[in-house]
Image (cartoon, grey):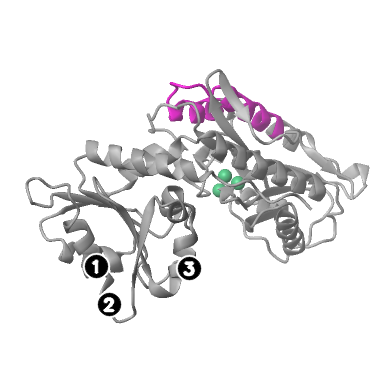
Amino acid sequence: MTPAARQVPAARYGERLERARELGLRRRLDALLIGVGADLRYLTGYEAMPLERLTMLVLPAAGPARLIAPLLEAAPARSCAAAAAGLVEVVTWQETDDPIALAGELVAGSPVRRTGRLDAVAVSDRLAAAFVLPLQAALPGARFSLASAVLRELRMVKDADEVALLCEAAHAADRVVAAIGAGPLAGRTEAEVSREVRDRLVAEGHETASFAIVASGPNSASPHHAASERRISPGEPIVLDIGGAMGGYGSDVTRTLWVTGGDRRREPGPEFRRLYTVLRDAQAAATAAVRPGRPAEAIDAAARERIAAAGYGAAFIHRTGHGIGLEEHEDPYLVAGNHEELRTGMAFSIEPGIYLEGRFGARIEDIVVCCPDGPDLLNEGSRELLVVDG
Ligand code: ZN
Ligand code: ZN
Ligand code: ZN
């Protein structure tokens, strides 16, 4: 058994709430309205249940931060890190109350507006339309915008506690890849192997196993293939892309395996070997290109140029990577057109792939943190083609 993942210290939530307020003020926002999801967890530590009942943090530009929660969720709401530390006040509502009216009163009653007029609020991107539309009606005259304008700025750059959690998750996922790579694989179905991946992710300390892509043979050419009843045969590749969350923070690693079943005649042929070498070099080049100040799209270009030069340009059908943290996919995205400059503390995947439809494909993925002097690779498993004899 591995020890339980570390936790983000309570003081950190105070800093995050203050910074969110500051950035909100700079954007002339009267309040941030943060519903259930990663934004709420980031600011308060509260992993709230997504219900049809309203749970929402009201963070005004000045005055107390309040967490609106249904009465039946009072216990978990009050025990979240920010509430337990006295940083947010939990305000409950009963089944017969109108939580939207309550939210409206809390926003309108906050002491920020010298003008006496409510100008602008921002709602978290994941707040359901079923809440947003009534809130708009309850706050007439207020301009509504997306709170990601503030939250992405904060969440994109990871602090040391977050990097430590990402690192633990990455190492746990690496151990699962190594265990699967030890075999046996030939003769088993993708679904069986996928179940083993999920069990192992949990055994290695993940609270959830979110995905376990096992794409064998021609399925390896489909980047998000769902594990099927197909039986793995000697003489074919497997794209293994697995991940989950530890202490809320994601793991996401891909390795490409080749199954021989112990038969030397089933080793990878020259075409697959060449494809894999091109991919490995492209992934290494993209990783080496990571540096503060570089635009995100430059990392994508570093991989894409090499893959295109080898003649596989049309077979690299997705962006090079995505940010990772409390969400599996978040800012920054490593994609052409994203001029966002990389900053120290940003964490993202680097995962180019080459996919020849109907035949085979390969992908290599690591989680990388941008450091002052270059990339810090959180995943440590070998990036060479993993040849499995069993
Ligand atoms: Zn993906
Ligand atoms: Zn992945
Ligand atoms: Zn990924």
Specify whether tag 1 is near ligand 3 (CB below 8 Å).
Answer: no
Q: Quadrant of residue 226?
A: bottom right
Q: Say if 384 sits above or below 259 in the image.
A: above
On the question of residue 163 being in view, the answer is yes
Q: Of the residues shown, which amino acid type is indicated by label 2? A: Asp
User: Of label 3 and label 1, which has the lower sequence position?
Assistant: 3
For label 1, count other residues whose C-alpha is less than 10 Å away and answer few (under 14), some (14-19) or many (20+). Answer: some
User: Of label 2 and label 3, which has the lower sequence position?
Assistant: 3
- Residues 202 and 313: in front is 202
Q: Which residues are magenta?
A: 276-305
For label 3, count other residues whose C-alpha is less than 10 Å away and answer few (under 14), some (14-19) or many (20+). Answer: few
Kindly check if marks 2 and 1 are in contact, taking CB atoms under 8 A apart as contact. yes
For label 2, count other residues whose C-alpha is less than 10 Å away and answer few (under 14), some (14-19) or many (20+). Answer: few
Q: Which residue is mark 1?
A: 102
Q: Of the residues shown, which amino acid type is indicated by label 3? A: Ala
Q: Looking at the rendered structure, which numbered label has been put on residue 75?
A: 3
Percent x, y for residue 19? 35, 38
Q: Of the residues shown, which amino acid type is indicated by label 1? A: Leu
Assign a secondary structure to mark 3: helix
Q: Which residue is mark 2?
A: 97
Alpha-carbon span between mark 3 and mark 1: 20 Å
Percent x, y for residue 349? 56, 38
Assign a secondary structure to mark 1: helix
